[in-house]
Amino acid sequence: MMAREKKRTIVLMAILLCNTVLPGTGSAAEWKKVGEDQGIVGYTRTTPKSSIDEVMAVGTIDAPIQVVEAIIRDPNAGKRFMFMCKEACSISTPDLQSTKDVMYNYNITDLPFPVKDRDAVARVEYTIDKATGTIYSHAEGVKSDYRNTGKMVRMPLVTLDYKLVPKGAGKTEITYLAMADPGGNLPPALVNLLTRTIGIRTIANIRKLAKEAPYKDTPAVVTTTPAMSHP
């Protein structure tokens, strides 16, 4: 999966990096369906926050909610389900202190030469609606000098949300919502083309992990912080 994604990225970059594409202003828009695979539906929309589109996907996983929660909470699993993820880990420094339901994660996105890899430090918060059992995960990039050596491009804007809704004892509906501006001089049209189905692929990869140990044997939900307000 990851090897095919990287090969596709190299081909698209070879085609599109030769073109000069001016960033758009990114006006707000309705969600547009861009794909569907095995019941997972993907969408994109423009956003005033960036010239890079927001990406969303919705699908169902044949696993109880604690299994899906365990996967998205495990930063080391990121290499197996996140788009072109080269490295993913949790961090805890004097200025970035992780707790049970608030974690700081570091991620590297592997891009083909001569484009520099991208990295990001994000604060991830987990909350739960105890009335419905719905779990929310909200990640947002933060400014940090952690491993900021200049060898990679630190992504200037990153947000990632998961919404997990229990659907009976053995199913979970998952919503993926992301907006990631890679920075640098990559044409927005190229980035949007590469990432338009990223949500579909992410949920498909989580489906695979949900069948594997140790995730499939997760006994219970661990998030305890009450959700305040969510759409």
Image: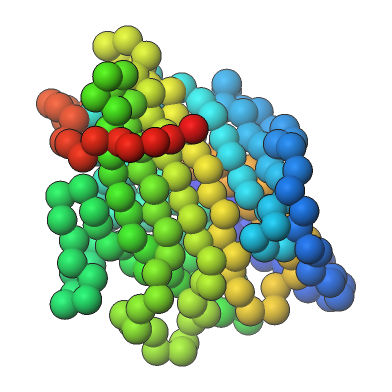
- For this orientation, the residue located farthest to the bottom is 150
Q: Quadrant of residue 141?
A: bottom left
Please indicate whether residue 93 sits to the left or right of residue 133 in the image: left
Q: Residue 32 in the image: state x and y as whole percent.
A: 74, 36
Residue drawn where x is 27% and y is 33% of the image: 128
Q: Residue 123 in the image: state x and y as whole percent.
A: 33, 60
Please say whether residue 149 is visible from this viewpoint: yes
Please indicate whether residue 89 sits to the left or right of residue 199 in the image: left
Q: Quadrant of residue 38?
A: top right
Q: Quadrant of residue 57?
A: top right
- For this orientation, the residue located farthest to the front is 228
Picture layout, residue 7 above or below residue 185: above
Q: Residue 4 in the image: state x and y as whole percent.
A: 58, 51
Residue drawn where x is 31% and y is 19% of the image: 132
Q: Nearer the viewer, residue 109 or 133?
A: 133
Q: Give the total of numbered labels.
A: 0
- For this orientation, the residue located farthest to the top is 168
Q: Residue 174 in the image: state x and y as whole percent.
A: 44, 29
Q: Nearer the viewer, residue 126 or 109?
A: 126
Picture layout, residue 83 above or below residue 117: above
Please indicate whether residue 102 sits to the left or right of residue 137 in the image: left
Residue drawn where x is 73% and y is 48% of the image: 28
Picture layout, residue 68 above or below residue 46: above
Residue drawn where x is 36% and y is 43% of the image: 137
Please say whether residue 67 is visible from this viewpoint: no
Q: Nearer the viewer, residue 65 or 15?
A: 65
